């Protein structure tokens, strides 16, 4: 099931960051989860649609589609 949120922060050099869900909870996002061609990065405040999955340290974003 897809959910929406906004990028709280994303460090392009480290390749990860966090998305703030509409429910308010933050979700870890790794650059490998970003869908699309070319350089995979996200901008602070950018709206995204993504799936939630269980990661090693809790919920994380998968199949991230920037809007």
Image (spheres, rainbow, N blue to C red):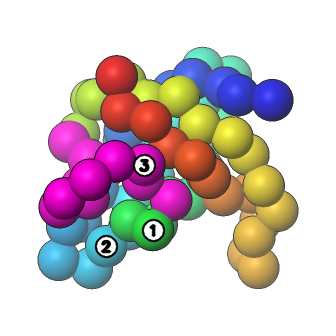
- Is 40 magenta? The answer is yes
Any part of residue 24 in sight: no
Residue at (17, 61) in percent of width and height: 39
Predominant secondary structure, magenta span: loop
Q: CA distance from mark 2 to mark 1?
A: 8 Å
Q: Quick one: 67 or 26, which is closer to the camera?
A: 67
Quadrant of the image occupied by residue 7: top left
List x then y, in percent, for residue 20: 51, 36
Q: Which residues are magenta?
A: 33-43
Q: Quadrant of the N terminus?
A: top right
Residue at (42, 49) in percent of width and height: 35
Upstream in sequence: badge 2 or badge 3 = 2
> Do labels 2 and 1 touch, CB within 8 Å?
yes
The residue indicated by pointer 2 is: 15
The residue indicated by pointer 1 is: 32
Q: Residue furthest front?
A: 37
């Amino acid at each position: 099931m897809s959910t929406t949120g906004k990028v709280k922060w994303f460090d392009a050099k480290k390749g990860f960051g966090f998305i703030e869900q509409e429910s308010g909870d933050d979700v870890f996002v790794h650059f490998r989860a970003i869908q699309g061609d070319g350089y995979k990065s996200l901008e602070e405040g950018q709206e995204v649609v993504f799936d939630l999955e269980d990661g090693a340290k809790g919920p994380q974003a998968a199949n991230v589609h920037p809007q």
